[in-house]
Amino acid sequence: MTPEEFQRVVLADPQLAEPIQAAAESGRSKQFGVLTEAAVIALMFPVAKHVLTSFALPWMQEAKRYSELQRQKVHEWINARYRYEGFDPEQAEAASDALLERLESTTDQSARTTWERLADLFAKSEDAADGD
């Protein structure tokens, strides 16, 4: 899945768009200025991709164990990846924390199904990239 495909999928589904935009806003600083909705979502592509492909969704694991272990792994990834990409790791951590909190509190089955579909799209694109 490319960042552009991610934007299209997220913008087409309010159950994805609202939490991802909220998470992005949590980590955004004034350095980015005023951004369009699509641009805000694009900033979340690497965080969302990593969270959804590297870890199962919270409701698919024991919640307490997930929250502590997975958050630490996400923070380690952010420190390495975002410095390389030129982003502020603190902003990326705030955005990923907000996204993880939202995922952990998702109880609506249709919302969970939507997030699972997005995770499947990421996994399929990872599998296709591995096969090249």
Image (spheres, grey):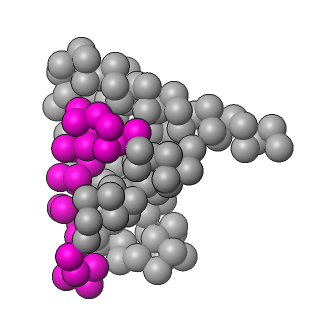
**Which range is magenta?**
9-34
Residue 124's spot in the image, x, y percent? 62, 32
Q: Is residue 100 visible?
A: no
Frontmost residue, 49 versus 121: 121
State the predominant SS element of the stretch in magenta.
Answer: helix
- Is 107 placed above or below 15 here? above
Residue 10 part of the magenta segment: yes
Residue at 46 percent across and 71 percent down: it is 82
Q: Tell me the quarter of the picture where residue 91 sits.
A: bottom left
* Residue lying at the far right of the rendered structure: 132
- Is 78 placed above or below 14 here? below
Task: Check the picture and name the quadrant holding the N terminus.
Answer: top right
Q: Is residue 1 visible?
A: yes
* Residue lying at the far bottom of the rendered structure: 31
Residue 88 part of the magenta segment: no
Task: Check the picture and name the quadrant holding the C terminus.
Answer: top right
Residue 47's spot in the image, x, y percent? 41, 54
Residue 129's spot in the image, x, y percent? 72, 44
Residue at 36 percent across and 72 percent down: it is 89
Counting labels gives 0
Residue at 19 percent across and 28 percent down: it is 106
Residue 33's spot in the image, x, y percent? 22, 81
Q: Tell me the quarter of the picture where residue 110 sits.
A: top left
Residue at 49 percent across and 53 percent down: it is 4
